[in-house]
């Protein structure tokens, strides 16, 4: 039996089962940790960006409501004051709607992030790794995707 045949036999009988049982679970946990980290960072980035925009919109609407209140206070007639109070009420409603939209969209982002997180973990957990070793080729198969690896030169 050639050196290459002995090596392939050792890989098939000893190394690969050991790798799949002990090394792959460690690598899989690392991959899961990396996915969790990336998803959290991406989610935080979206939340921050969206939150800043919504906060800015809220502040602008609130400022316009205060400006209209101020104009109502400075008005010379009751009709003009009522007009500005109505405008202020509208801007307060707009500001409140921005606040509610922010909360709703943040909840939806949390829900979507959790769904992607669960899907990612499930996908990695279901990952099935197999190998077919021979003297002429090696095929690695992950789930339904197979790749023929270059021949190992000795």
Image: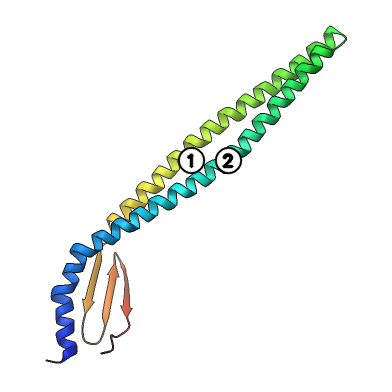
Q: Secondary structure at mark 1?
A: helix
For residue 9, above or below residue 35? below
Q: Residues within 10 Å of mark 2 (few under 14, many from 20)?
A: some
Q: Earlier in the sequence, mark 2 or mark 1?
A: 2
For residue 59, above or below residue 87? below
User: Real-space Cα distance between discs 2 and 1?
Assistant: 10 Å
Residue sitting at x 78%, y 17%: 70
Count of residue discs: 2
Q: Position of residue 44 (x, y in %)?
A: 49, 44
Q: Outermost residue toward the bottom?
A: 2
- Which image quadrant for residue 86? top right
- Where does label 1 land, which residue? 109
Residue sitting at x 53%, y 46%: 45
Q: Position of residue 75 (x, y in %)?
A: 85, 12
Does residue 145 appear left or right of residue 107 in this picture? Answer: left
Residue sitting at x 43%, y 39%: 111
For residue 129, above or below residue 57? below
Q: Are marks 2 and 1 in contact (CB under 8 Å)?
A: yes
């Amino acid at each position: 039996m050639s050196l290459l045949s002995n090596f392939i036999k050792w890989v098939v009988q000893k190394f690969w089962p050991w790798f799949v049982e002990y090394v792959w679970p460690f690598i899989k946990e690392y991959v899961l940790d990396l996915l969790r980290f990336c998803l959290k960072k991406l989610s935080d980035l979206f939340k921050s960006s969206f939150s800043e925009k919504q906060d800015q919109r809220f502040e602008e609407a609130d400022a316009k409501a205060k400006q209209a209140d101020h104009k109502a206070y400075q008005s010379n007639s009751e009709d003009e004051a009522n007009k500005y109070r109505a405008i202020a009420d509208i801007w307060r409603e707009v500001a409140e709607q921005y606040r509610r939209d922010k909360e709703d969209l943040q909840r939806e982002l949390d829900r979507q992030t959790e769904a992607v997180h669960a899907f990612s973990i499930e996908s990695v957990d279901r990952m099935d790794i197999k190998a077919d070793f021979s003297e002429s080729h090696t095929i690695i198969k992950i789930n339904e995707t197979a790749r023929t690896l270059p021949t190992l030169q000795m």
